[in-house]
Image (cartoon, grey):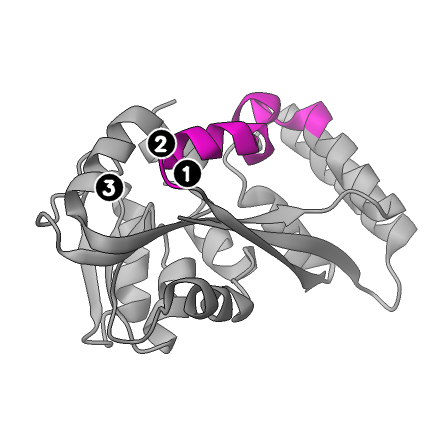
């Protein structure tokens, strides 16, 4: 599947059930790069605007660059009332933005979809001298019994989960992307709470998960309900995340 089109049929679940980003990201940027609300931000692979909203709420002008039409249109529906939100049809490799026009490039949950060589060339073009790049992910943890069971479900039913999992990106590859600049790293904890319907929606927001109607879908949902019933406490389960941010 064309990576730019993977989430077109997942938009509603993506908006409702994917985690946002903690405000510690903004503090890290401020501490390390003197980031402030005057900076112009390009959110590359902005999707439905989850990471875009973090920077709009901070007062930044944000160019939300997204190639997937349904995802971009949903971001427009949600954020167009903010005059600092600028929706752009483009890719990491061809943003269409002006040269040396951006203070901060950010990619939230998206860098692993990019062609790193072409993206680096494009980022170099649009970034102003002295600007910064931040790559960030909400990385789901796999320590609790529930988290381990959920991971096993993905390994069993995810169509290409092992190939497209963002954890395949190593720090060595991130370092190579940023060269010759050294990168700084910060990690913070983050959590999501799910009842049964929200957990189901969270699963179906993933591009590698089969959708109905199919026998595989029915077996998968049955297994997910078994996992939920076995591990819920007070009608809810939790995803623990580590939000990882790499800045250079």
Where's residue 146, x and y in %? 84, 47
Seen in the image, is 248 located left or right of residue 87? right
Identify the magenta region: 155-181
For the residues bearing labels 2 and 1, Cβ distance under 8 angstroms: yes
Instruction: Write down the quadrant of residue 54 in the picture.
Output: bottom left
Q: Is residue 228 above or below residue 63?
A: above
Q: Is residue 9 visible?
A: no
Kind of element beneath mark 2: loop
Callout 3–callout 2 Cβ contact below 8 Å: no
- Label whose residue precedes the other's in the sequence (3 or 2): 2
The residue closer to the viewer here, 99 or 240, is: 99
Q: Where does residue 182 sit, x and y in percent of width and height?
A: 44, 42
**Dominant SS type (magenta):** helix
Name the residue carrying label 2.
Answer: 114
Query: Between marks 1 and 3, how big is the CA–CA gap?
Result: 12 Å
Disc 2 to disc 1, C-alpha distance: 5 Å
**On the image, numbered disc 3 is attached to which residue?**
123
Q: Nearer the viewer, mark 3 or mark 2?
A: 3
* Residue 171 part of the magenta-drawn span: yes
Image quadrant in which you'd find residue 170: top right
Residue at label 1? 111
Residue at 42% x, 29% y: name it.
176
Residue 149's x, y, as percent?
A: 82, 38
Label 2 Cα neighbours within 10 Å, binned few <14 / some 14-19 / many ≥20: some
Residue drawn at the location 12% of the way across and 49% of the way down: 97
211 or 174, which is in the foreground?
174
- Say what secondary structure mark 1 lies in: helix
Q: Nearer the viewer, residue 87 or 35?
A: 35
Q: Position of residue 53 (x, y in %)?
A: 38, 68
Name the image quarter holding residue 148. Answer: top right
**Is 163 inside the magenta-drawn segment?**
yes
Look at the image and tell me in which quarter the N terminus lies: top left
């Amino acid at each position: 599947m064309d990576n730019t089109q993977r989430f077109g049929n997942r938009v509603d679940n993506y908006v409702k059930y994917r985690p946002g980003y903690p405000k510690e990201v903004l503090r890290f940027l401020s501490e390390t790069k003197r980031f402030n609300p005057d900076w112009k931000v390009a959110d590359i692979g902005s999707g439905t605007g989850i990471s875009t909203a973090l920077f709009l709420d901070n007062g930044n002008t944000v160019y939300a660059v997204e190639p997937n039409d349904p995802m971009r249109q949903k971001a427009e529906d949600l954020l167009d009332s903010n005059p600092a939100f600028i929706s752009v049809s483009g890719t990491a490799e061809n943003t269409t933005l002006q040269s040396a026009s951006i203070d901060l490039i950010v990619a939230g949950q998206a860098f692993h979809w990019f062609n790193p060589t072409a993206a680096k060339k494009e980022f170099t073009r649009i970034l102003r001298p002295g600007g910064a790049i931040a790559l960030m992910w909400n990385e789901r943890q796999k320590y609790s019994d529930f988290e381990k069971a959920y991971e096993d479900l993905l390994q069993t039913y995810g169509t290409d989960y092992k190939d497209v999992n963002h954890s395949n990106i190593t720090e060595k590859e991130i370092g190579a992307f940023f060269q010759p600049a050294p990168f700084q790293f910060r990690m913070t904890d983050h959590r999501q709470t799910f009842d049964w319907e929200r957990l189901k929606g969270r699963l179906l927001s993933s591009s590698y998960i089969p959708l109905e109607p199919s026998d595989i879908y029915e077996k998968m949902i049955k297994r997910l309900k078994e996992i939920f019933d076995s591990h819920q406490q007070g009608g809810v389960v939790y995803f623990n995340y580590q939000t990882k941010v790499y800045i250079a």
